Amino acid sequence: MSRRLRMGMVGGGAGAFIGAVHRHAAALDGQIDLVAGALSSTPEKARASGRALGLPEDRTYGSWEEMLERELSREDRIDFVSVVTPNHMHYPVARAFAAAGIHVISDKPLVTSSEQAADLMRVVAETGVVFAVTYNYTGYPMVRQARQMVRSGQLGELRKVTVEYHQGWLAEEQDEATNKQAGWRTDPARSGLGGAIGDIGSHAENLISTVTGLELEAVCADLTAFVPGRRLDDDASVLLRFRGGARGLLTVSQVEIGAENDLRLRVHGTRGSLLWRQEDPNHLTYDTLGGPRQVLTRGGPGLSEEAQRATRLPAGHPEGFLEAFANVYLGAAAHIRAGLEGQGHTPDYPTVEDGARGVHFIERVVESSRGGEKWTDAVWTGGQGQMATTRQE
Ligand SMILES: NC(=O)c1ccc[n+]([C@@H]2O[C@H](COP(=O)([O-])OP(=O)(O)OC[C@H]3O[C@@H](n4cnc5c(N)ncnc54)[C@H](O)[C@@H]3O)[C@@H](O)[C@H]2O)c1
């Protein structure tokens, strides 16, 4: 390894959720130092947050614009910025840093429109910066194992993919003053077009795409806002059709009382099936046609090179969310380092293109749900109505 990478952060100030996770993930493997930050939406809170983390005074910035300008004038400027703001700020921040030649690690959803996504892809292509999107579930060793098994054909031809993402923390109206995470997530101006479908549906879409490589052909979506007055969906079910004939179902919800972070992926092919659950991430269930069920364990025997590389501890010592997150950071860091050393590199992390495809997915799902015309009336009227309908036809 050459020198440690220098990281800046935008967002993730006092009281924020995912910024701290990014910091833990970046620190886990001793390759990255957080050296600068514009951590909050007001200069006072941003500076106080930087101080609380022990950032140097001259690199604790009041705004991301100030951070960009002042970092660019330093010899020891940051190598990359992590963008961990609410969704509407991803685009201006990520675009400005990428355009200035600074690598970016941004959280999902990438941006809030396809136009922004296309523009960002263009900037990334022009500047050649590394751009990673923290679809962190792709970093789990057993997800990487699933990807390797599916893509090497072990499941045969894919038939059906089901992804479920169940949460319950938005089951009732939230007061933004006491729950800032809920506040912006339920506000279209800050969240974007999607509520639950953007917040966790984006992870679900990416998980399918990462593991299977299947390309979406069409969606048929039903989005709902169950909580009265909520302006964005808090529950979504989407039928999926993939190129080549495979079918799928994506269902996500943030109003399922009792559900925590219950993300599940099932992949079924002509020769076998896989099941992976985020709340039991060290295991992968594998069934073959006519064979006994196998439960593969992280760190256990018989795993692929990809899964082994993503593993830090021996089997039986649980790894989880932070380690998976750190694997996305490791992937981006390896690419940044390869650039510093003048070497070529094949990205092994979710890229700006993955992020842009995720934004397109959210837009198509919202569009499908608004359309409504694809639904066939299925109301049971007690027999007479159905018979009458049949006769009329
Ligand atoms: N990958 C995951 O598993 C995961 C999980 C949670 C959230 N997220 C994503 O991470 C992002 C942040 O979510 P969160 O739950 O941490 O939100 P949060 O509300 O807890 O934190 C957002 C932070 O951004 C700051 N901020 C807002 N505007 C800013 C600006 N102009 N400049 C600097 N800082 C600014 C806020 O002050 C706050 O500190 C969202 O895009 C969300 O979708 C991803």
Image (cartoon, rainbow, N blue to C red):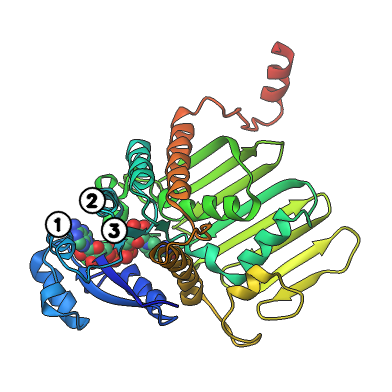
- Name which residue lies at 25% across and 55% down: 97
Ligand 1 within 8 Å of disc 3? The answer is no
Q: Classify the position of the N terminus by image quarter.
A: bottom left
Instruction: Determine the secondary structure under disc 2.
Output: helix
- Residue 234 appears at what percent x and percent y? 41, 51
| Number of the label disc, if any, that sits on residue 102 | 3
Q: Is tag 2's residue or tag 1's residue first in the polypeptide sequence?
A: 1
Mark 3 neighbour class, 10 Å CA radius: few under 14, some 14 to 19, many 20 or more: many
Q: Classify the position of the C terminus by image quarter.
A: top right
Q: Is tag 2's residue or tag 3's residue first in the polypeptide sequence?
A: 2
Q: Are marks 2 and 1 in contact (CB under 8 Å)?
A: yes
Q: Does residue 264 lie above or below 282 as drawn?
A: above
Mark 1 neighbour class, 10 Å CA radius: few under 14, some 14 to 19, many 20 or more: some
Q: Label 2 belongs to which residue? A: 96
Residue 123 visible in the displayed image: yes
The amino acid type of the residue labelled 1 equals Glu
| Number of the label disc, if any, that sits on residue 65 | 1
